[in-house]
Image (cartoon, rainbow, N blue to C red):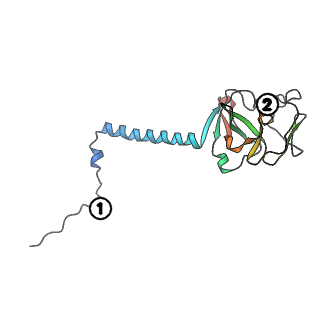
Amino acid sequence: MIVPPPVEPPADEPVVDTKHSKLPPGARAFFDWMVVIVVALLVAFLVRTFVIAHFVVEGESMYSTLDTGDRVFVNKLSYRLHDPNRGDVVVLHQITGASERDLIKRVIGLPGENVEVRNCTVLIDGRVLDEPYLDPEVVTPTNCGGDFVLDGVVPADHVFVMGDNRGGSQDSRVIGPISEDDLVGRAFVVFWPRSHWQWL
């Protein structure tokens, strides 16, 4: 007796997910949306934790570059990829005793450099630092914080930071050079309020 060969389905026959197809259409849509929402929340958490954060400026230490209430985006990956650069606006994490706070300042001095302030002018290794970001109506002879000379040089893996409002900033002239490990990241844009939008 001749037995015919088994009949195989065509190669292009669609595969049916019988488990998923048992769900009614409304439940399938709900399941799909839940997957999308969970994935979106996970991505947002990872971005917020490791890539970009936003901070609200408090105080006048960076006036007139930044005002109280300005919201800035901070790139948290910057200093994992390269060293801080002079002129960067940075958010740093300061721990004083039992208190913690985040400060926003500008990088002025780099490792191995000596920093002085004479007659409201910053000198790096004796050379005048050009600071076009300063507001001459804010940084005046009566509002620049007085003269300052760093004892020695900025240590390795540290930066010297100052506020753009020199007379109203508690910065490295008071708290000393900042370890790069305490830098949260580089502030790169003011995104709110809309009228204050600017790249930093």
Looking at the rendered structure, the kind of residue marked 1 is Ala
**Number of residues whose C-alpha sits closer than 10 Å to that of mark 2, classed few (under 14), some (14–19) or many (20 or more):** many
Residue 97 position, x and y percent, is: 68, 31
Q: x and y percent of residue 7 in the render? A: 20, 64
Corner quadrant of residue 142: top right
- Mark 1 vs mark 2: give the one in front: 2
For residue 97, above or below residue 124: above
> Where residue 187 appears, x then y in whole percent?
68, 39
> Residue at label 2?
165
Q: Mark 2: which amino acid?
A: Asn
Q: Is 108 in front, or is 29?
A: 108
Looking at the picture, does residue 58 appear above or below residue 153?
Answer: above
Q: Earlier in the sequence, mark 1 or mark 2?
A: 1
Front position in the image: 17 or 185: 185
Residue at the spot 28% in from the left edge and 51% down from the top edge? 16
Give the Cα separation between the discs numbered 1 and 2. 73 Å
| Element at label 2 | loop
Work out which quarter of the rendered image holds the C terminus and state it. top right
The residue singled out by tag 1 in the image is 11
> Which numbered tag is attached to residue 115?
none
The spot of residue 159 in percent (x, y) is 76, 43
Considering the image in quadrants, where does the N terminus appear? bottom left
Q: Secondary structure at mark 1?
A: loop
* Residue 155 in the figure: left or right of residue 96: right
